[in-house]
């Protein structure tokens, strides 16, 4: 089940909330929230829900005793269970077919990264949360053991289960401990509704609107001239941004309904002034996870060049099981290192030039998400105007108009600031309420064309 389905919006979510706020049953809220979250996840395959549950039980059993604090061996043992599951489900085909080069009887591979959705959905996200919990217990940041049900609430909470934000236990500890006494406040719920509506609209109206053009152009990269190729680069850049940003806004908004304040995951990333700044703004929860659990333990800035290459290669591999993802990670490592070496020159450029150059370079990198590894080189020839295609796919005025509209929304609409209008007078609340109603029903009208969230495959 996904957020952009009628069944979720009009059946699952209302029932989840009714059960959560049922009078006289507040003491059962943790159990209820775990139950509905497992139903939400289990609808994609109950065998995958068993993998999720097994990871929770594994980590709970090993970290429940306070002897895990400062105990490296137990922490490794707790972490290795979820990581092995991640390796098996996500990387076994990559290892067997791409790394080892093993084929079937006909000499062909039997698995396509882009034709098959890699399940369990969102395994990379909940695995990182399980590992973060185990390490935080080891470091003593979580001083007392957490019961099985609170731990399950933390891991399975359906608004952020499949595609983040990647949350630390201490960020939601207060919300989990106060679940039984939680009373929704108007401002929090109203802001939650606004964020969820904006997120749905960005996904359905902007990301999926661009997807119809991206799908056509990317279906055969050898038929693109330079104009169409660059259009595809920028259109997909906007698509993946609004797709993931829309999900994150919905996750944060839905979390407010249940008393959870989830962290922001996007801080206007396409306004970044340089590649380093971009990673402070894009998928913030992942960037901080990598910093705290990989980069700093590896030595941080003391081994800067080595560590940047390692963490970005792993970041790419986290996104997907393929050489294209590893190259994408190394591409960003080169950008960050290159910025470090050229910072005096880069920072002296006009602000608008810095933003435009960063956006251009980041957008080029998304090509590795769009195509199989073998198609990237031929697409690069198209960007250089060296395509030998007899028929070139045209870019219509409608397509340029849609991309221009998405760009305006990207740089001139800030949902978080607009949502803050709810804290002002009655007139602003009424106007925003009407606007949200129009936006919501507009999104519902186009829900039938909506696609699965891109980051669900990660």
Image (spheres, rainbow, N blue to C red):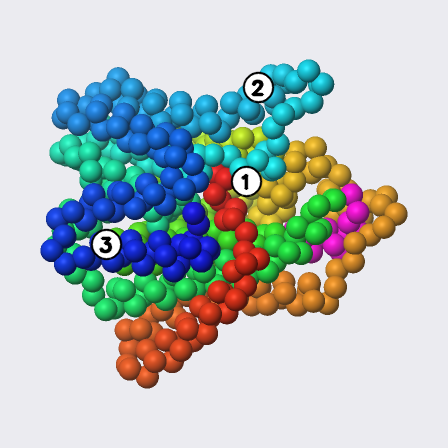
Q: Is residue 226 magenta?
A: yes
| CA gap, disc 3 and disc 1 | 45 Å
Foreground residue among 115 and 380: 115
Q: Which mark is residue 96?
A: 2
Numbered label attached to residue 332: 1
Instruction: Residue 211: give x, y in percent of width and height.
Output: 61, 54
Q: Nearer the viewer, mark 3 or mark 1?
A: 3
Q: Secondary structure at mark 2?
A: helix
Q: CA distance from mark 2 to mark 1?
A: 27 Å
Quarter of image, res 292: top left
Left of 159 or right of it: where is 215? right
Q: Is residue 191 above or below residue 455?
A: below
Label whose residue precedes the other's in the sequence (2 or 1): 2
- What residue range appears in magenta? 222-235
In the picture of the structure, the residue carrying the numbered disc 3 is 19
Residue 429 visible within the image: yes
Mark whose residue sits in front, 2 or 1: 2
């Amino acid at each position: 089940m996904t957020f952009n389905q009628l069944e979720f919006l009009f059946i699952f979510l209302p029932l989840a909330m009714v059960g959560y706020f049922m009078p006289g049953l507040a003491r059962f809220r943790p159990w209820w929230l775990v139950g509905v979250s497992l139903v939400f996840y289990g609808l994609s395959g109950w065998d995958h829900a068993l993998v999720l549950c097994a990871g929770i039980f594994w980590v709970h059993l090993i970290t429940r005793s306070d002897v895990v604090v400062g105990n490296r061996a137990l922490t490794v043992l707790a972490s290795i269970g979820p990581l092995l599951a991640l390796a098996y489900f996500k990387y076994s085909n990559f290892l067997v077919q791409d790394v080892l080069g093993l084929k079937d009887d006909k000499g062909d591979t039997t698995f396509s990264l882009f034709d098959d959705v890699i399940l369990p959905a969102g395994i990379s996200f909940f695995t990182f949360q399980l590992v973060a919990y185990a390490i935080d217990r080891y470091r003593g940041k979580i001083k007392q053991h957490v019961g099985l049900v609170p731990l399950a609430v933390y891991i399975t909470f359906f608004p952020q289960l499949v595609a983040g934000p990647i949350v630390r236990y201490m960020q939601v500890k207060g919300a989990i401990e106060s679940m039984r006494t939680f009373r929704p406040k108007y401002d929090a719920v109203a802001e939650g509704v606004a964020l969820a509506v904006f997120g749905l609209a960005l996904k359905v109206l902007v990301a999926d609107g661009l997807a119809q053009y991206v799908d056509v152009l990317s279906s055969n990269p050898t038929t693109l001239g330079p104009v169409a190729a660059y259009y595809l680069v920028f259109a997909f850049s906007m698509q993946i941004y609004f797709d993931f940003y829309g999900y994150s806004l919905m996750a944060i908004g839905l979390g407010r309904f249940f008393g959870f304040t989830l962290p922001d995951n996007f801080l206007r990333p396409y306004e970044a002034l340089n590649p380093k700044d971009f990673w402070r703004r894009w998928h913030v929860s992942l960037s901080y996870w990598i910093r705290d659990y990989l980069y700093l333990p590896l030595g941080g800035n003391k081994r800067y060049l080595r560590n940047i290459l390692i963490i970005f290669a792993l970041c790419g591999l986290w996104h997907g099981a393929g050489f294209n993802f590893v190259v994408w990670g190394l591409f960003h490592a080169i950008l960050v290192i290159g910025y470090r070496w050229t910072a005096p020159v880069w920072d002296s450029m006009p602000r608008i030039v810095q933003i435009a150059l960063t956006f251009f370079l980041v957008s080029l990198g998304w090509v590795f998400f769009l195509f199989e590894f073998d198609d990237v080189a031929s697409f690069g020839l198209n960007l250089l105007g060296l395509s030998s295609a007899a028929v070139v796919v045209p870019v219509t005025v409608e397509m340029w108009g849609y991309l221009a509209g998405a760009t305006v929304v990207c740089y001139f609409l800030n949902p978080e600031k607009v949502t803050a209008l709810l804290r002002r007078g009655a007139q602003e609340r009424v106007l925003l309420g009407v606007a949200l109603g129009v936006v919501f029903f507009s999104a519902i009208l186009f829900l039938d064309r909506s696609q699965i969230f891109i980051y669900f495959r990660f």
